[in-house]
Amino acid sequence: MLRLSKKMLFAIEAVLDIAYHAGSEPVQSREITRRQDIPRRYLEQALQQLVREDILIGVRGPRGGYRLARERRRISIGDIVRAVRRMETADDPLQETTGSELGVKVVRPLWMEMQGEVMKQLDLVSIDDMCNRAHKAGIDSEGRKSLDFII
């Protein structure tokens, strides 16, 4: 069942943070924790899952961190939601085969249909769209501040 869990919210915020605040160096998890106030235990789990799902790339080393695995316009909120859903272990009541006839034949199919519509909408929103929203909201990008365009 599609629900907005803390892990899902944190994963979306983390990917958006990496995209929005990225400069020339990878974004370190401690920077995300500082800016987004995400507990490290949630953040590290989410970041590792996003690396496994090819949404992020983990960069090792003292100046390591995370980068987007592809252009921000090619990563949708739906991609992130699916990645986190695969990580979460909670049982999905929509997948149960037992239940009342009304539940199995009427309520669950309706819920699955609605969930499909929500996912279609989430697939239409890219990380680039979210970065543009952040810019319009007047949120400063730390990565843009640190870029130096000396010619």
Image: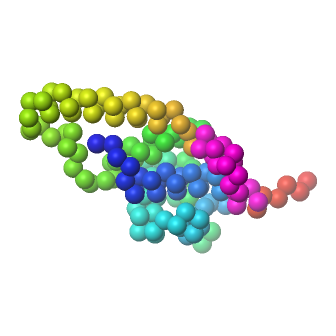
In the rendered image, residue 62, in percent from the top left (x then y), is placed at 60, 72
Residue furthest toward the right? 151
Residue drawn at (46%, 32%), measured in percent from left and top?
121
Image: 121 above or below 139: above
Image: 110 above or below 91: above
Judge whether residue 127 is colored magenta.
no
In the rendered image, residue 113, in percent from the top left (x then y), is placed at 31, 28
Q: Main secondary structure of the magenta part?
A: helix
Residue drawn at (66%, 43%), measured in percent from left and top?
132
Magenta segment boundaries in residue numbering: 128-145
Residue furthest toward the bottom? 62
Residue drawn at (26%, 29%), measured in percent from left and top?
110
Taking the image as shown, residue 49 lies to the left or right of residue 133, namely left
Q: Is residue 59 visible?
A: no
In the rendered image, residue 53, in percent from the top left (x then y), is placed at 43, 48
Residue drawn at (21%, 39%), measured in percent from left and top?
94
In the rendered image, residue 30, in percent from the top left (x then y), is placed at 55, 70
Residue 32 sits in quarter: bottom right
Tell which of 82 and 67 is nearer to you.
Answer: 82
Tell which of 100 and 120 is nearer to you.
Answer: 100
Taking the image as shown, residue 136 lies to the left or right of residue 14, namely right
